[in-house]
Amino acid sequence: MFGSDSIYMPSKSRKKKLRIGWFTFTCSEDSSIILLELFNEHYFEWKEKIEFAHCKMIKSKNDQTGLDVAFIEGAISTDTEKKKLLEIRKNAKKLVAVGACACTGMPSSQRNNFDDKAKEEITPFLKQHGLWGKVLTVKDVVPIDDSVPGCPMDGKMFVSLLDRYFVDFGIVN
Ligand code: SF4
């Protein structure tokens, strides 16, 4: 599917593409799977309209600078994730939370609702792995422009949002 003529390579026939990044934080990465499934239907269209500047599931060399849109999957649960998200926000004109974990924190933020006993029991593990006791949503950390709800994300809503951005960024009329 992703040969030399892959979806993220610049096209010679079209000057302007929507430069996007896909980023995954604390979650089970199922919205990533939905995105891959959507390629089955949209590959040839998106190949002409999208530059996947950062998308680690389909390419090894990634660049998160100068993004039109950053899509954020997953909740935020460590200092490292927070720092990375702040950096992405600086580099993206639009930032979109995708999937329930990014939009609401749940289910990745289950431990926020643990009782005191359970919280005490997991404390050593949190410390060991540098994890926060309280997991945050994406919008708890940075301003967001849009969101795609669902667990995993709603594929139709994701495609509709992309279509809107194609217009907003002058990729299509
Ligand atoms: S929103 Fe749901 S499907 Fe997506 S990563 Fe979180 S738990 Fe998994």
Image: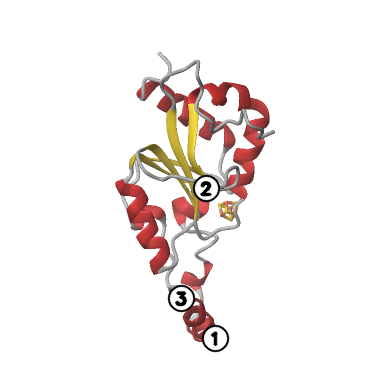
Residue 165: quarter of image: top left
| Residue denoted by label 3 | 130
**Which residue is depicted at the point 46% across and 70% down?**
112
Residue 52 in the image: state x and y as whole percent.
50, 36
Is the residue indicated by label 1 positioned so its CB lies within 8 Å of ligand 1?
A: no
User: Which scheme is used to colour this image of the protein?
Assistant: secondary structure
Hey, what amino acid is under mark 3?
Answer: Gly
Within 8 Å: ligand 1 and the Cβ of disc 3? no
- The reply to whether dot 3 and dot 2 touch (C-beta < 8 Å) is no
Which numbered dot is residue 121?
1
Amino acid at dot 2: Gly
Mark 3, Cα crowd under 10 Å, few <14 / some 14-19 / many 20+, is few
Task: Identify the residue at horizontal 35%, vertical 45% (top origin).
Answer: 144
Taking 63 as reference, is 111 above or below it? below
Label 2 packing within 10 angstroms: few (<14), some (14-19), many (20+)? many
Looking at the image, which is closer to me, 83 or 104?
83
Q: Is residue 170 left or right of residue 10?
A: left
Of callouts 1 and 2, which one flags the residue occurring earlier in the amino acid sequence?
2
Q: Rounded to the nearest whole Å, what is the CA distance between mark 1 and mark 3? A: 15 Å
Quadrant location, the N terminus = top right
Where on the picture, by quarter, is residue 6? Answer: top right
Does label 3 or label 2 sit earlier along the sequence? Answer: 2
The reply to whether the C-beta atoms of the residues labelled 1 and 3 are less than 8 Å apart is no
Which residue is the site of mark 2? 99
| Mark sitting earlier along the chain (1/3) | 1
* Mark 1 surroundings: few (<14), some (14-19) or many (≥20) residues within 10 A: few
Mark 2 sits near ligand 1, with its Cβ under 8 Å away? yes
In the image, what residue type sits under mark 1? Answer: Glu
> What is the spatial separation of the Cα atoms under label 1 and label 2, in whole angstroms?
29 Å
Which residue appears at 52% of the width and 34% of the height? 158
